Image: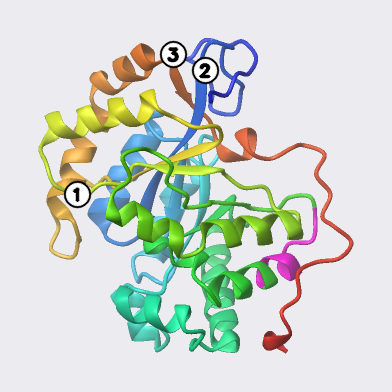
């Protein structure tokens, strides 16, 4: 299914305006801003060249305070949101994080502390707002932990009480729909996509419907272009296409080779050609997902375990 919106040229079109009716609109989100200087510099380059329409920030990173200021210069062009973190070294050093398998198991067994989860979410939102001087445009999760059991309930509880005005962040739903579906995609889905969407709807938060851009982070630039063409050709309604770019390898950068490959492809003229040939265009999620007259519900989600 394809999104059809009103008319505007997509070669010079601002990402806050609707595209031509023949185009499919989606959000292109670069994850992990702030993780390393190389990743942040790469994402900034893509934002300045209008090759992405959103980025997600790891606010626990010691690099975030320094890199928040240059990101403010492009906040009128892209959505800037929080990349909620439980599995990086930053989260582990804060005392609540763990490896992805650990966090998956503890959350699935409901062994995570809801109160600890609430404090960790508040802390990351505080750090985001302190250095960016603005509330997040959206909320998603590093390795999709934001939709895990316990964490998702704590998250929606915090968001409902913290953002009570009409200016609320949209929520990324990590639901992979493309076929054939990899084991990685199946695991992402089963860890809470449907449950998080139900909570977001109940609490009155706009959200995406689908996620694409999932792969094993192997392959050269030609293979990544091929993957991009496949993702763009099969976009469901209200999709986020996540990417993980970065400039250079960088000693602290995970998935370093894949990041450099993605950066090379996304910054190239071929990416715009690919958008043209697949009749797709990037929009900010605040434009694509959020109705302008949304009013928060009078009753919000409440989890008694957080009291």
Residue farthest front in this picture = 180
Magenta highlight on residue 163: yes
| Pointer 2 residue | 13
**Residue drawn at (25%, 46%) of the image:** 215
Secondary structure at badge 3 equals loop
Q: Position of residue 193 (x, y in %)?
A: 52, 57
| Pointer 3 residue | 11
Span highlighted in magenta in the image: 158-165
Q: Quadrant of the C terminus?
A: bottom right
Q: Residues within 10 Å of mark 2 (few under 14, many from 20)?
A: some
Nearer-the-camera pick, 109 or 54: 109
| Pointer 1 residue | 217
Q: Residue 158: which quarter of the image?
A: bottom right
Q: CA distance from mark 1 to mark 2?
A: 31 Å
Q: CA distance from mark 1 to mark 3?
A: 29 Å
Which of pointers 1 and 3 indicates the residue nearer the eye? 1
- Would residue 60 be found to the left or right of residue 156 on screen? left
């Amino acid at each position: 299914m394809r999104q059809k919106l009103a008319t505007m040229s997509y070669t010079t079109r601002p990402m806050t305006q609707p595209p031509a009716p023949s185009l499919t609109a989606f959000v292109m989100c670069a994850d992990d801003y702030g993780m390393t200087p190389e990743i942040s510099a790469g994402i900034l380059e893509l934002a300045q060249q209008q090759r992405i329409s959103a980025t997600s920030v790891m606010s626990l990173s010691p690099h975030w305070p320094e890199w928040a200021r240059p990101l403010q210069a492009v906040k009128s062009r892209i959505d800037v949101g929080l990349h909620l973190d439980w599995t990086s070294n930053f989260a582990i050093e804060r005392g609540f994080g763990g490896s992805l398998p650990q966090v998956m198991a503890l959350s699935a067994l409901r062994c995570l502390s809801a109160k600890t989860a609430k404090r960790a979410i508040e802390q990351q939102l505080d750090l985001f707002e302190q250095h960016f001087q603005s509330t997040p445009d959206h909320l998603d999760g590093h390795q999709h932990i934001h939709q895990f059991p316990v964490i998702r309930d704590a998250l929606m509880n915090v968001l409902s009480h913290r953002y009570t005005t009409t200016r609320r962040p949209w929520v990324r739903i990590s639901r992979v729909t493309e076929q054939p579906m990899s084991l990685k995609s199946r695991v992402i889905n089963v860890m809470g996509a449907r449950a998080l969407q139900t909570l977001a709807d109940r609490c009155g938060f706009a959200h995406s419907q689908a996620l694409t851009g999932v792969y094993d982070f192997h392959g050269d630039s030609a293979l990544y272009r091929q993957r991009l063409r496949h993702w763009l050709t099969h976009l469901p309604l209200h999709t986020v296409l996540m990417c993980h770019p970065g400039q250079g390898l960088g000693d602290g950068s995970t998935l370093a080779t894949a990041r450099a490959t993605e950066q090379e492809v996304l910054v190239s003229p071929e990416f715009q050609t690919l958008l043209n040939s697949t009749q797709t265009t990037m929009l900010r999620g605040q434009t694509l997902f959020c109705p302008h007259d949304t009013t928060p519900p009078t009753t919000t989600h409440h989890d008694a375990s957080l009291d």
